[in-house]
Image (cartoon, helix red, strand yellow):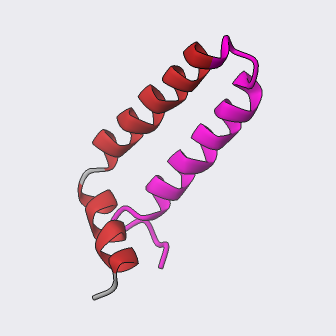
Amino acid sequence: MSLVDKLKGMLGQNADKAKDAVEKGGDMIDEKTGGKYADKVDMAQEKANEFIDGERPGSGAA
C-alpha cells in the first residue's frame, strides 16, 4: 500500500478532524498575514474540503 493510499484511508476515517485542521490552518495563515491572502486561503480551504469529502467511503469517488 502506497503512502497516498494510506493517506486517503486516514482521511476517509477522520474527515471531520481533517476538515477542522484545514480550517485552523487557514485561520492561522490569515492571522499571520493580516488577511492579505484571505481569498486565496479560502479557496485552498474549499478545495481541500472538497478533496476530503471525495475520499469518504461510500461517497462514490475512487
Front residue of 50 and 28? 28
Indicate whether 38 appears above or below 17.
above
Image coordinates of residue 41 in percent, x first then y, are: 66, 32
Q: Is residue 42 depicted above or below 13 in this figure?
A: above
Residue at the spot x=42%, y=27% of the render? 24
Estimate the x, y position of residue 2 in percent, counting from the top left.
Answer: 33, 85
Write down the region rendered in magenta.
33-62
Placement of 62 over or under 30, stated as above or below = below
Q: Is residue 7 left or right of residue 61?
A: left
Left/right placement of residue 40 relative to residue 7 reads right
Residue 61: x and y in percent read 49, 73
Left or right: residue 58 compared with residue 45: left
Q: Pick out the residue farthest to the bottom.
A: 1
Residue 37 image-quadrant placement: top right
Q: Quadrant of residue 29?
A: top right
Whether the magenta-drawn stretch holds residue 61 is answered as yes
Image location of residue 44, percent across then percent down: 64, 42
| Front in this rendered view, residue 33 or 53 | 33
**Residue 51 is one of the magenta-drawn residues:** yes
Q: Which of the pair 39/53 is nearer the observer? A: 39
Depth order, front residue of 34/16:
34
User: Could you tell me which residue is drawn at 42 percent across and 64 percent down?
Assistant: 55
How many numbered marks appear? Answer: 0
Magenta span dominant secondary structure = helix
**Relative to 61, residue 21 above or below:** above
Q: Quadrant of the N terminus?
A: bottom left
What residue do we see at 29% from left, 69% from top?
Answer: 9
